[in-house]
Image: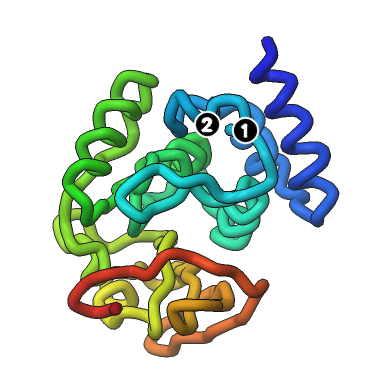
Amino acid sequence: MEYKHQRESMVENQIKIRGITDERVLKAMLEVPRHKFVGDALLSIAYQDSPLPIGYGQTISQPYIVALMTQLLDVKDDQKVLEIGTGSGYQAAILAKLAMSVITVERIAELFQQSKELLHNLGYKNIIVVHADGSIGYKEYAPYDRIIVTASSPRVPDSLIEQLSPNGKIVIPIGNRIIQRLEVILKEGESVKREASEGVRFVPLIGKEAW
């Protein structure tokens, strides 16, 4: 009950107040137990308005940024989503509430194993967790209706655009290793359109087509 109240406060005071209006996103943020995705030492601050360390130089993103990226992605319930950078598994759990299926790729073996076990134990049946270089996407289940990248890249990897369905959408932080801006990539036929959103700061995307 305590965590339920904390989630309600998180949604009201960190997310809605900043302009997140998608009711499906808000519902998912209310339902997914964020405290399950942080270590025991951080349980008391699991719902605070900031990113938190999850080990191996990685973080679980600030709740507002998770909500913002999810709203920008505009996921429909019949769509297949590719997530690059599983991390704790929290963003994948949010997406699983909205999409038909989620394929999430993690480079770090320890985080891959932890998130795979956690998501399984929490009962998420429409998530596939993969250990691979996410900068080149994941061809096995392509094409994808939506792609979300939860690490920063100096550019949009070509492989992700190739694996995106027609009329698909990518949300990705683009910039240098210090500061980036969220970009929304829209694939319309043979053309690709880019729209910039908010300034952010993410850990770098390490791989063949990124850093």
As drawn, the label of residue 42 is: 2
Task: Tell me what residue is drawn at x 75 percent, y 47 percent.
Answer: 15
Task: Tell me what residue is drawn at x 51 percent, y 39 percent.
Answer: 94
Above-or-below relation of 8 to 154: above
Residue 181 lies in quadrant = bottom right
Tag 2: Cα neighbours inside 10 Å, few (<14), some, or many (≥20)?
some
Q: Residue furthest front?
A: 41
Q: CA distance from mark 2 to mark 1?
A: 6 Å
Quadrant occupied by the C terminus: bottom left
Q: Amino acid at mark 2?
A: Leu
Residue 79 image position (x, y, % from top left): 42, 50
- In the rendered view, how is the structure colored? rainbow
Q: Nearer the viewer, residue 105 or 49?
A: 49
Residue 58 image position (x, y, % from top left): 38, 53
> Which residue is denoted by mark 1 in the rendering?
45
**Dots 2, 1 in contact, CB < 8 A:** yes
**82 with respect to 140 (left or right):** right
Q: Nearer the viewer, residue 153 or 50?
A: 50
Quadrant occupied by the N terminus: top right
- Does the rendering let one see residue 82? no
Disc 2 is placed on an element classified as helix
As drawn, the label of residue 138 is: none
Residue 67 image position (x, y, % from top left): 63, 50
Q: Residue furthest top?
A: 1
Q: How many marks?
A: 2
Q: Amino acid at mark 1?
A: Ile
